[in-house]
Image: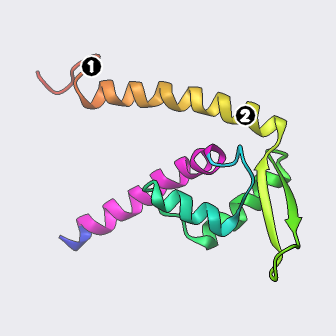
Amino acid sequence: MSNVKEMVDKLLQELRRGTITIAVLSQLEKPQYGYSLVTILAEKGVQVEAGTLYPLLRRLEKQGLLISEWDTNEARPRKFYMLSDLGKEVYKKMLDEWKKMALSMDGLINGGGTEHGDD
C-alpha cells in the first residue's frame, strides 16, 4: 500500500509543480512579499514551501514577469513582488489556457468526449 502512496505523492508533486506558477502569478496584481504569499496561498488551499517559492519568484523576476522593490521601513527589510506589464499579459494567457485544459480534463474525467475501454 505504501507503494501506491509513494506513487501518488510523486505524481501530485509533478502536478503541483505545473500549477504553482499560475497560483503565484494570480496573487501578484498587488505587491506581496514571500512570506505573505506563502500565507495567502495556504489560506486558499495551495501549500507552497518557502524553499520552492523564493527560487520561483527569482526566476519569474529574471524572466521579466515580476518586478520587485525593497521595503526598508520595517525593522527587517522585505522584498515585495508584483506582476510587470509582461507578467500581466503572460498571466492572462496562461489563465486562458488553464481554463481550456480544466474544461478538457473535466470532460475526460466525467465522460465527455469519446469513451474508451467500453469494447
| Residue 63 x/y as whole percent | 82, 48
Callout 1 crowding tier (Cα within 10 Å): few <14, some 14–19, many ≥20: few
**Which residue is denoted by mark 2 in the rendering?**
90
Residue closest to the far front? 73
| Residue 19 x/y as whole percent | 53, 47
Residue type marked 1: Gly
Tell me if residue 73 comes above or below residue 33 in the rendering: below
Q: Quick check: is 72 in the magenta stretch?
A: no
**Which residue is denoted by mark 1 in the rendering?**
112
Between 29 and 98, the one lying in front of the other is 29
Q: Residue at x 61, y 71 (%)?
A: 50
Q: Residue at x 21, y 20 (%)?
A: 115
Secondary structure at numbered mark 1: loop
The main secondary structure of the magenta stretch is helix
- For the record, the magenta segment spans 4-26
Q: Quick check: is 23 in the magenta stretch?
A: yes
Tell me if residue 58 comes above or below residue 19 in the rendering: below
| Residue 61 x/y as whole percent | 82, 53
Callout 2 crowding tier (Cα within 10 Å): few <14, some 14–19, many ≥20: some
**Left or right of 79: which side holds 40?**
left
Tell me if residue 11 comes above or below residue 72 in the rendering: above
Between 14 and 70, the one lying in front of the other is 70
Residue type marked 2: Val
Specify the quadrant that holds the N terminus.
bottom left
Q: Earlier in the sequence, mark 1 or mark 2?
A: 2
Secondary structure at numbered mark 2: helix
Question: Is label 1 in contact with label 2 (beta carbons under 8 Å)?
Answer: no
Residue closest to the far top? 113
Nearest-to-viewer mark from 1 and 2: 2
| Residue 116 x/y as whole percent | 21, 24
Q: CA distance from mark 1 to mark 2?
A: 29 Å
